[in-house]
Image (cartoon, grey):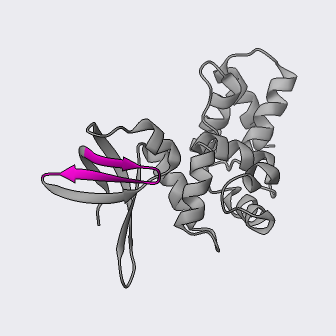
Amino acid sequence: MIGRLEGRLQRVDPGTVLVDVGGVGYRVATTLRAYQELGDGARAALWIHTQVREDVIVLYGFPDRDELAAFEKLIAVAGVGPRIALGVLSALTPAELRRVVERGDSARLQGCPGVGRKTAERLLLELKDRLGPLPAEAGDPRGDAASALVNLGYTQRDAARADAARAVDAAWAEAPGVEVGELLRLALQRLTR
């Protein structure tokens, strides 16, 4: 399986690029966002998802690993194929997708190419716990504390017990402006009650 390609771009078209790697040209399907970032003749490194079917091998390429991971989680959803996944990632960055799923914003997903009401609802339901925590913004103690809790094994969303984000938000409301270490301690107290 091909996991990464690095080479000179021979041709860049909306949705596909041709990457020359040691004299061999690989045609790779990409998002429209990747198309806008890449230029003919430039060197590029793409993270690859290889799909092997009975009649063809298709390569899907992404400039960063986060986009590749989001693509693989999207195609794992029933009824969502690579074409829809590329459409979603052409319209939304992986961080935006996480926010949309966290907020349950079905309308925003329906604005993506190929996504109707039922597909949007399925994506929201199935991706809720798969995409992981939102990346913390620099200097955001709440994001850092929630990320630390997830790394400790607490889930981002879990109906059976208080989830990491709610515990951090409740601790922040109790003691706004505290540093991340203290915020983490307060959130852990809430989770272990």
Q: Which residue sits at x=86%, y=23%?
A: 174
Predominant SS along the magenta part: strand
Image position of 57 (left or right of 30): left
Q: Is residue 32 magenta?
A: no
- Residue 32 versus residue 54: which sits nearer the camera? 32
Image position of 73 (left or right of 35): right
Give the image location of residue 118, x and y in percent: 79, 68
Q: How many marks?
A: 0
The image shows residue 24, relative to residue 45, as above or below, that is below
Rendered-image quadrant of the C terminus: top right
Q: Is residue 20 magenta?
A: yes
Residue 95's quadrant in the figure?
top right
Give the image location of residue 46, x and y in percent: 35, 47
- Residue 50 versus residue 17: which sits nearer the camera? 17
Give the image location of residue 88, x and y in percent: 62, 54
Image position of 3 (left or right of 33): left
The image shows residue 176, relative to residue 21, as above or below, that is above
- Residue 50 versus residue 23: which sits nearer the camera? 23
- Residue 176 versus residue 48: which sits nearer the camera? 48
Question: Where does the magenta region start and end?
Answer: 9-22
Q: Which residue sits at x=68%, y=50%?
A: 155
Spot the residue most to the right: 174
Spot the residue most to the bottom: 54
Q: Which residue sits at x=86%, y=25%?
A: 173
Give the image location of residue 48, x and y in percent: 37, 56
Q: Which residue sits at x=84%, y=32%?
A: 170
Rendered-image quadrant of the N terminus: bottom left
